[in-house]
Image (spheres, coloured by chain):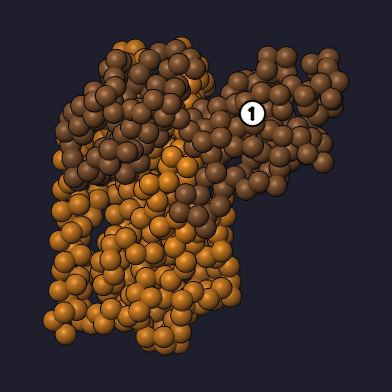
Chain colours: A brown, B orange
Amino acid sequence: MNVRPDGYPLGDGAITLRFGDARSAALLELIHAGARHLRRRNIAHVEDVVPAYLAVTIFYDPLGASFEQMKARLISALDEMDSIAPAGDAGREHVIPVRYEGVDLDYVAAQTKLSREEVIAIHSGRTYTVDLLGFVPGFGYMSEVDPRIQLPRRNEPRPRVAAGSVAIAAGHTGVYPLPTPGGWHILGTTDVALFDAGCPEPALLAPGDRVRFQRTE
Amino acid sequence: MITVVRAPAYLTVQDSGRKSMLSAGVPRGGAMDSFALAAANSVAGNDPNAAALEWALTAGAIRFDQDRNFAFAGATPDISIAGRDIPPLTRVAARAGDLLEVGPLTARRFLYLAVEGGIDVPAILDSRSTYLPAALGGYQGRILRTGDKLTVGPATGSRGEFRCPPELLPRYDTLDIRITRGPQANCFGDESWRTLLTAEYRISRSSDRTGYRLEGQPLGHSLGTLPSEAGCPGAIQIPLDGNPIVLMADAPTVGGYPKIAVVAQADLPILAQKKPGDSVRFNLVTIEESQRALRRVAADLAMLRDRGQAAHSRQ
């Protein structure tokens, strides 16, 4: 791997490997590839690998390996990456059908001086990348929303947003997997389950996956 | 079977949590005081990670519908079984029909009640822990209510007296909590570090299984929020107002506030047991010292587990 990350302890059981200081699509792609590589390597005592914008965090059992031991293993595993990473190693693709009748559709149209139809066409007109998962189980932060419909999040988050709500805030779009509080602008609803606790892999989305929203009635 | 006869304000099923679902956005969760969970289980004759009841705030009562050993650890309210007072960290035999009565929790915050065989709720994503924000795991994903009946696992056949030596317990009364430098430690200047390591911080009223807010001297930084990255229980994050928040068991898996430091896992049970208004002080140690302290705790707990099991194989 041509970028050697800096490693910092995140407490006794995790290491944050930082790959850069500024967000970019290229850096995120590198981080997703690095995270997939570390997962595939099944390094002893590693419990989970969590990629994010500038860093990958590796959770491990500190009774099995010390910080320095684990850091050395991770860096050396990443050093082999160039020769091992298959070309085009990328996430899956998902098409998520959406009924565009969300409570904030009119508000977004008014704020952006577009028609409802234009907002819908712009939101469903591009492919998004899942940057990272978090906030609640199965919630994927996807980017990048077309600048024409980017709006800051609501000042007052709603106490409860229904599961399946498709929403936007700033450069991100996402789907609420569970009923939770939420401050994003709701454009529509999907019946696709984003999180199923009964599955061994409960989250539909993974970092690096690509998502298209398809208008449906 | 055990029956909740009078539910306290907070009662859930918890075990040691979910270690490998963070990448799906599922927090580790599990017992807030991991030491007390393991100790109560070992004394009851269970695996240290077995599912137990996590109890907080108010008084309540539980009825045993079958003969079972049990033990409690963590908080130290008045507890009696069939009208007889019982001490913490001690194996007690309950008979079918016995009523277990727990007084209000005044000293410390979370009580763990381990029943021989463990609480038998379905394992969801490899854990029986209740994660309330997603209504996941535990007993129907929720807080237990009066009238709920819980199945317990097969009896281990444990008999005889067994107690946890009190010298193994964390120093719950200390103000001093060990921390290691966090991923954004370098983004905080000397003055912020001096404040963090000398000021006393009070646990705020708005603190729960997600995080403990601290009140005291705010810490200055010019970072604002950063692109989100993974956090962990014990991470001390500094939001824009400068008042630290310590992430706890149910904290979201990622977040954007800079993390100045992380509480040593060996001391997280001590912090977890602090109540609103209690004070803490932070002492900086190296990651090597912190991991060494954790290994000592793990060795103590392994010894306790082995002795707990030996105590029943003798019968």
Q: Residue at x 48, y 30 (%)?
A: A208
Q: Is residue B82 left or right of residue A197?
A: left
Q: In the image, is residue B63 above or below residue A135? A: below
Pinpoint residue B117: horizontal percent, then vertical percent.
34, 74
Q: Residue at x 84, y 25 (%)?
A: A117
So how many labels did they put on this image? 1
Pinpoint residue B230: horizontal percent, then vertical percent.
41, 32
Q: In the image, is residue A21 above or below residue A84? A: above
Which quadrant would residue B135 be assigned to in this image? Answer: bottom right
Q: Is residue B83 left or right of residue B293?
A: right
- The one nearer the camera, B25 or A192, is A192
- Specify the quadrant that holds the N terminus of chain A: top left
Query: Element type at marker 1?
Result: strand
From this viewpoint, is residue A147 visible? Answer: yes
Q: Residue at x 35, y 18 (%)?
A: A19
Q: Amino acid at mark 1?
A: Thr
- The one nearer the camera, A10 or A200, is A200
Pinpoint residue B182: horizontal percent, then vertical percent.
32, 26
From this viewpoint, is residue B288 visible? Answer: no
Q: Residue at x 78, y 27 (%)?
A: A120
Pinpoint residue A200: horizontal percent, then vertical percent.
45, 54
The residue singled out by tag 1 in the image is: A173
Q: Is residue B264 left or right of residue B240?
A: left
